[in-house]
Image (tube, rainbow, N blue to C red):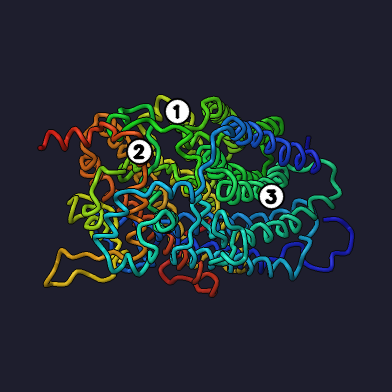
Amino acid sequence: MSSQAVTRPLVDEGLVKAMIVAAMAWFLLAIVAGLLFSLQFLQHYPFPTIEWLSPGRVRFVHTNMIAYGFLVNGLLAGVTWAIPRLTGRPLLFKRFSWVLFWAWQVLVVLTFTGLLTGHAQGVEWGETPTGFRPGAFNLKDMNWAPVDILVVIAFIFVSINYYTPVILSKSKAMYVSLWYFSAGFVWTALTYVMGNFFPEYFLPGAAGAAVTGLFIHDLVGLFVTPMGWGLMYYFVPLILKKPIWSHGLSLIGFWALAFFYPLNGVHHFLWSPIPMYAQYGAVISTIAVEVVVTTVVVNFFATIVGSGEALRDSLPIRWFYTGMIFYFTTCLQCAVQVTLTVQKIIHFSDWVVGHSHLVMFGVFGFWVLGMMVHLWPKLTGNAWYNPRLNHWHFWLSAVGMFIMFWDLIIAGLVQGYEWQALAPWEQSIISSAPFWMVRTLSGTMIVVAQFIFAYNMWMTARGARSRLYVAAPQPA
Amino acid sequence: MERFSTVFLVAGVAFFGFSIFVMAWLPFENMRDIPHQSLTHLGQKVSPEFAQLAKMFPDSFKKYYPAGVTPTSYAKALRLGRDTYIAEACWHCHSQYVRPVSNESIRFGPVSVAAEYSNDLQLPQLFGTRRVGPDLIREHGKHTNDWHVAHFWNPPDVVPVSVMPRYPWFYEAAPTEAEPDRYVLNERGIAIVTYVQWLGSWLEEYPATLYNLNAEGAR
């Protein structure tokens, strides 16, 4: 810490705590929505005639609450914890940070309500309501809260809030985490504006599809990924009590990601009417990202060499490194599935659904959860109510994710080949049925795991200790 | 390379700007010559399916489309149908483009081209990324209005294995016990059927697809 008089605590721990609680609450809602939606595929949807619980609308809730409820709150909780510690300065706003926090929750509530009442925007993963009907950008046609515009305004304040300590920091060279955060905030704002306004008002058809593809991908690559890796570069060395293996590799990883990742998006619409050079470019830069990812993963695995026991002893480290293995898997998969040859079969199928679940839950969800496991006792000042429940949480989540991934990957291949073979469409539904059943079961495992964790968090916050848990004797 | 200004300006702004230039602006510039069709223009070619819906549901039609079977009513129905298609997440399980691979042109019809998408109803574009159900861009005329009316009420009634949700809120009222087959569409119901029947109606002739061939074989 610098010697200057700090008039308030460096980190507003109450805010971090509130963000974690909000993240967890939205997360539970999102995964219940996902599980509910999966029942439609078994022809057993419990509310088939209730309009606002229509399966399609519930699916919007699943993906949007994960992005804007769970990941934004969860990742920002980590960033709120890390940035002041890395810069030696608190965030710019003290009370206004809380205003921003609550404003964000209101926006998520508005999005949730808007999606269920039929005001979704036709942009995948950006279904947050626009408030204005396309082609008529005027107040008269506004039929819902303009969530998109409010998100942009809120995010500008959020960026100012988090950038200020970085800019005012006395040290000349920033630590790796701060590179990711510094780029991540401006990327997020630009990505959101690009995806939510241009295809809706200015760019129809194929030109709009190119931009929508960029949006879907950039929300993962330019918001979630930089925040996630930034936090890994912060928490992993801290918990392992050793520096990251190679500074040079982290430089390569960051700059190559910054260059190649934004070029990937069009790969969501391969073999579409978008000009082919854009599609070829997207394929090549996607494969390039795989090389980048390898450097980052090598860096982290070289860091843990010699401290392997941490995987057993430290639950956060286990979450982080399991997430990294899934990350490498998903990126390797991406380098293969993105090719035009493989796209012929797997595009439009459940393969893609498996891929996206592995990325969003298996990687970034795992990192956020690991961070929560690490931070929650510090924030509440209490030891875990029952550490064994946290192990159940980990194993149910990890095994559930593993099953869901392979289940959907195989389902995707079955569907893709049946479509290509010109089997009647109904055949692909019949063949998918057992896979969809397994998907629901593995999803149930994941949902149960999160409720166990939420219960453990709740009891820990109350300062309770489980009678069932007897602490293992500590080695002398 | 490790300063805030470098990271912010080069990685944050310049690299992102470069990606927009290559991946968004260049394709846009390439396709700029394609004429854009307004909704009013699309409404001019009133479909026979829309006229038939007016006859099938005279009361609802008069109530919601008082102008009758006109380009204005048709445009209104297309817009509302498209909005409903978005609000109900139809586009999360049905794509709207035929690829030149995987025998899709045999299954669905002619491969999609960019010019088909340069219109007000593709703002935002509805290409879609997942097919639980089939692609819909060549849907025009593949099924009758009657089929769609029964299908939206309860898809498994028509296609037993279907996992498509029910949409009872597209109807004025539930069919009565006395007349179990009498479905009456409401405003949104008429609009969504009109919209789905519009998809692909701009093609010069009915495409010879697997669906047609099967249907002929069955006859």
Query: What residue appears at the point 76 percent right and 60 percent down from the top-left corner?
Result: A91
Name the image quarter holding the C terminus of chain B: top left
Image coordinates for residue B130, horizontal then vertical, percent = 38, 43
Earlier-in-chain disc, 3 versus 2: 3
Tag 3, which chain? A
Earlier-in-chain disc, 1 versus 2: 1
The amino acid beneath tag 1 is: Val
Q: Secondary structure at mark 1?
A: helix
The amino acid beneath tag 3 is: Phe
Viewer-closest of A400 and A123: A123
The amino acid beneath tag 2 is: Ile
Viewer-closest of A405 and B58: B58
* Residue that carries the numbered disc 3 in the rendered image: A185
* Residue that carries the numbered disc 1 in the rendered image: A336
Name the image quarter holding the N terminus of chain B: top right
Could you tell me how far apart the alpha carbons at marks 1 and 3 are, in whole angstroms?
30 Å
Image coordinates for residue B5, horizontal then vertical, percent = 81, 42
Residues flagged by tags 1 and 2 on a common chain: yes
Tag 1, which chain? A
- For label 3, count other residues whose C-alpha is less than 10 Å away and answer few (under 14), some (14-19) or many (20+): many
Could you tell me how far apart the alpha carbons at marks 3 and 2 are, in whole angstroms?
33 Å
* Residue that carries the numbered disc 2 in the rendered image: A409
Query: What residue appears at the point 79 percent right and 61 percent down from the top-left corner?
Result: A92
Image coordinates for residue A343, horizontal then vertical, percent = 41, 30
Q: Secondary structure at mark 3?
A: helix
Tag 2, which chain? A
Image coordinates for residue A381, horizontal then vertical, percent = 62, 68
